[in-house]
Image (cartoon, rainbow, N blue to C red):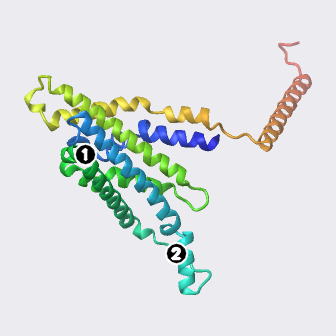
Amino acid sequence: MEYVGELILIAVGAAVVNNFLLHYFVGVCPFLGVSRRVDMAFGMGCAVTFVITVAGALSWVFTYYILQENAPLATWIYQKCSGDPTAKSNLSILNYLIYIFVIASSVQLVEMYVRKFFPPLYQSFGFFLPLITTNCAILFACLMILKYVDGTTGWGIGQALTLSFFAGIGFTIAIVLMAGIREELELCDVPKPFRGAGITLLIAGILAMAFMAFTGVDKQLGKILVPPKQTTETTVSDEKTAGKSKDASTLVMNKTKDSIKKRPSTWMEQ
C-alpha cells in the first residue's frame, strides 16, 4: 500500500501540482507553437507523452545499470576487462549524451509512426514534431529521474515510469487548455498590441497562477496515503520520557511545598 501511495503522489505531483509546463516552465516552444487547435494540441501531447515515457524508462535503465557510480553492469564489465575485482566504474559524465541519444531515437520512432498512419496529423505538426528532440521537458524528466536514482534506496523503474507518463499527461492537459482558450480568442476582439505571442504568454501566466491553487495537495494527500511509521520502540521511549517528566514535576512540587512549610514567618503573618 505504501508503494502504491508513493506512485499516486508522484503522479499527482507530475501532472498537476508540479506541472512541467506551468510550474517549471520547460517545454514552452511546442506549447506556444502547436496550441492553435485542440486536435493538433492533443496529438502533440500524445506524442510528447509517448516520447517522455520511453525516454524516462530507458534513462532509468541506462542510469541504474551503466551510468551511475558503481553501476552493476558497468562495474562488472570494468572489473572483467581490468582484471581488478575491486575496480569501480563511474560514467556519469556521459549522462547528457546518452539522454539526448535516447530522446532522439524515441522521437524518430514517433515520427515514422505518425507519418505512416496519420499523414494529416504529421503535416499539421510540421517542423514541431522533430523539435520534440530538443524539448527540454523530456530532458528535464530524465534529469529528475537521475536525481532520484540510487543503487540501494532510490527510485525503481515503477517510479520512473510514473513520473515520465504523468509528466506527459500534465503536458497534454496544459497544451489542450491553451489550445481551447486560443480557439475562443479567435472570436474575441483582442487589442492589437496583445495579438499573437503577447496574449498567448499572458494566458500562459494566468494558467500558471491557476495551477498554483494545487500547491500543497500532494503533501496533504501524502499524509493520507503514506502515514508516518510509529514503531514500538518509539512508543516505549515516549512513554518513558512522559513518565520521567511527570516524576520530575511531582518532585519539584513536593520540594516547593516543603520550602513553604520551612519558611520563617514574617511580621505581616504574625
Q: Is residue 129 above or below residue 35?
A: below
Which of labels 1 and 2 is toward the front?
Answer: 1
Sort mark 1 into few (<14), some (14-19) or many (20+) by Cα contacts within 10 Å: some
Q: Mark 1: which amino acid? A: Pro
- Quarter of the picture holding the N terminus: top right
Q: Residue at point 53% right, 80% down?
A: 78
At mark 1, the secondary structure is: helix
Q: Amino acid at mark 2?
A: Ser
Residue 236: image x %, image y %?
82, 40
Vertically, is 142 above or below 222?
below
Please give left or right for residue 119 compared with residue 58 in the image.
left
Quick one: 199 or 56, which is closer to the camera? 56
Q: Which residue is mark 2?
A: 89
Side of 25 where 5 appears, left or right = right
- Image x and y of residue 124, in percent: 19, 44
Residue 116 coordinates in the image, percent (x, y): 26, 52
List the residue tagged with mark 1: 30
